[in-house]
Image: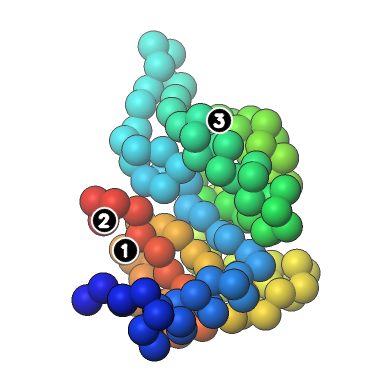
Amino acid sequence: MTARRGSRPARTLARRARAIRLLVLDVDGVLTDGRLHYGPHGEEVKVFHVQDGLALVGAQRAGLQVAVLSGRASPAVSRRMADLGIGEAHQDVANKLQFLRGGLIRRLRVTPAQVAYMGDDLSDLPRLPPWVWPWLPPGV
């Protein structure tokens, strides 16, 4: 179902979007294409899209806080997030919802209704509470 411009669902969606102050992103499958690449010496290689980086820098400049939560640890993620000025890059997070509830939201001084989450970890979706605004990348 698509909300028509000016309809009640569209107004509700617009109101919720204006309230967002924290964008939380998964890495694999959201900031990458989800495939695992290994170099000739077994090192993990991640491919990030430059346009995603431009959008994240622009979002931060506009005042949106951006955090990255990944269930895996990778030097490539650390490097990319540093390049983008994203200080809230958390890796090896086994339970992302617990991490959000356990301090990130409070520490960043946002309310749960001000959080939008994008991830493709289907195991996380059933546990997401109704206050999280979930987004899924294409193909999920």
Q: Residue at x 50, y 39 (%)?
A: 52
- SS state under label 2: loop
Q: Position of residue 57 (x, y in %)?
A: 65, 42
Q: Residue at x 24, y 51 (%)?
A: 139
Amino acid under label 3? Ala
Is 133 rendered above or below residue 9?
A: above
The residue that disc 3 covers is: 76
Extreme bottom residue here? 8
Assess disc 2: are there few (<14), some (14-19) or many (≥20) residues with their C-alpha within 10 Å of its C-alpha. Answer: few
Relative horizontal placement of residue 80, taking residue 31 as reference (left or right): right
- SS state under label 3: helix
Q: Determine whether label 3 and label 1 are within 8 Å by CB.
A: no
Q: Nearer the viewer, residue 57 or 102?
A: 57
Assess disc 3: are there few (<14), some (14-19) or many (≥20) residues with their C-alpha within 10 Å of its C-alpha. Answer: some
**Sequence-first tag of 2 and 3:** 3
Relative horizontal placement of residue 66, taking residue 48 as reference (left or right): right
Q: Residue 99, labelled with which disc?
A: none
Q: Residue 122, labelled with which disc?
A: 1
Q: Nearer the viewer, residue 43 or 20?
A: 20
Q: Nearer the viewer, residue 42 or 66?
A: 66
- Whether residue 78 appears in this view of the structure is no
Assess disc 1: are there few (<14), some (14-19) or many (≥20) residues with their C-alpha within 10 Å of its C-alpha. Answer: few
Relative horizontal placement of residue 130, taking residue 62 as reference (left or right): left
The answer for how far apart the CA atoms under marks 1 and 2 are is 8 Å
The quarter in which the C terminus is drawn is: bottom left
The residue that disc 2 covers is: 140
Q: Determine whether label 1 and label 2 are within 8 Å by CB.
A: yes
